[in-house]
Image: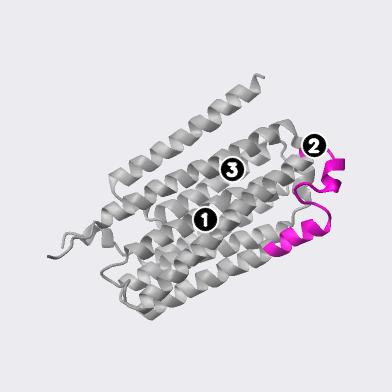
């Protein structure tokens, strides 16, 4: 059966390390949110959230080891979302 | 005649569905962002009424449950069926705990007269009404997805127990896991937007 590649088995240590990283980043984002940094706060929070979600996507959801089709279509989705967000902001800012 | 299973096709199908979910919640986040821009002060006031402890604890619950789901797939692929079911059971318990917390959070808000259409909100600033409207809509829709995810994970547990999902055939578990991770992903963004605004 030519299914060997998708039965990739990650070592437990990988997913444990990812969880530790995620919990640590959660602590960081909570700590930073308690410091008054003005407009920077929300951007840092979103940046940390993006890093956390990348970890979940790459390792828990296996995106790092998935086929090119899945990886590319995922990026297309993110790009579409970025266009939606970006263009709406662009519109709102000039009203 | 032996039927070929198209595992890659089934996985692609699940990912395509997940993309629609990303657009769904992405759209809601866009609404949030635009109203935050317009009513920043009220949004900050609203954010202060949410329990940072509950939000952080719920975040930890979902992150850990995502880990146990990922671990359950590893366990199944290694042939350790009981370990896989234990990990899944842990994920389900954590998901239920998340919903219980949500129940207490919402209940506390209701008790203070904060709910869609309440007279207290109607008397207050417009921006605050919008903040709570978004809070209930987004966390409510997310909560619904948690429920759906828990149903999926429970079905998987039963199928593993009955041997319908096993070492050589685990796409149903993998796809259910993907859905659960998405639920976690969405919460990773909900958390800062509602609980971490100063």
Instruction: Tell me the distance, in whole angstroms, between the alpha carbons under discs 1 and 3.
Output: 17 Å
Q: Which residue is mark 1?
A: B183
Instruction: Tell me the distance, in whole angstroms, between the alpha carbons under discs 3 and 2.
Output: 26 Å
Q: Quadrant of the N terminus of chain B?
A: bottom left
Residue B156 point in image, percent of width and height: 41, 70
Callouts 1 and 2 in the same chain: yes
Labels 3 & 2 near each other (Cβ < 8 A) = no
In this view, B160 is above or below A90:
below
The residue sitting at 29% across, 44% down in the picture is: A68
Q: Is residue A56 visible?
A: yes
The extreme left residue here reads B1
Residue B45, picture quadrant: top right
Chain of residue at mark 2: B
Instruction: Tell me the distance, in whole angstroms, between the alpha carbons under discs 1 and 2.
Output: 30 Å
- Camera-side residue: B41 or B173? B173
Disc 1 crowd rating (10 Å Cα; few below 14, some 14-19, many 20+) is many
Q: Which mark is residue B126?
A: 2
Q: Quadrant of the C terminus of chain B?
A: top right
The residue sitting at 34% across, 72% down in the picture is: B76
Labels 1 & 3 near each other (Cβ < 8 A) = no
Q: Earlier in the sequence, mark 1 or mark 2?
A: 2
The residue sitting at 55% across, 62% down in the picture is: B147
Q: Which mark is residue A46?
A: 3
């Amino acid at each position: 059966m030519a299914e060997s590649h998708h039965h990739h088995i990650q070592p437990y240590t990988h997913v444990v390390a990812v969880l530790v990283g995620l919990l640590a980043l959660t602590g960081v984002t909570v700590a930073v949110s308690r410091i008054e940094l003005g407009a920077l706060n929300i951007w840092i929070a979103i940046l940390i959230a993006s890093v956390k979600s990348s970890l979940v996507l790459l390792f828990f959801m296996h995106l790092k080891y998935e086929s090119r089709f899945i990886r590319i279509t995922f990026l297309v989705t993110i790009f579409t979302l970025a266009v939606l967000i970006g263009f709406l902001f662009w519109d709102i800012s000039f009203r | 005649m032996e039927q070929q299973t198209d595992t890659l096709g089934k996985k692609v199908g699940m990912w395509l569905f997940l993309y629609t979910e990303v657009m769904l919640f992405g759209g809601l986040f866009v609404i949030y962002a635009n109203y935050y821009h317009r009513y920043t002060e009220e949004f900050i006031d609203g954010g202060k009424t949410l329990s940072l402890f509950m939000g952080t604890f719920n975040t930890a619950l979902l992150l850990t449950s995502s880990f146990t789901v990922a671990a359950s797939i590893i366990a199944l692929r290694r042939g350790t069926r009981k370990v896989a079911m234990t990990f899944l059971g842990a994920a389900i318990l954590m998901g239920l705990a998340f919903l219980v917390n949500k129940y207490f959070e919402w209940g506390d808000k209701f008790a203070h007269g904060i709910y869609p259409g309440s007279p207290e909100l109607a008397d207050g600033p417009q921006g605050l009404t919008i903040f709570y409207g978004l809070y209930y809509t987004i966390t409510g829709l997310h909560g619904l997805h948690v429920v759906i995810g828990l149903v999926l994970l429970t079905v998987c547990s039963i199928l593993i127990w009955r041997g319908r999902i096993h070492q050589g055939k685990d796409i149903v578990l993998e796809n259910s896991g993907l859905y659960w991770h998405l639920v976690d992903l969405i919460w990773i963004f909900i958390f800062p937007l509602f609980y971490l605004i100063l």
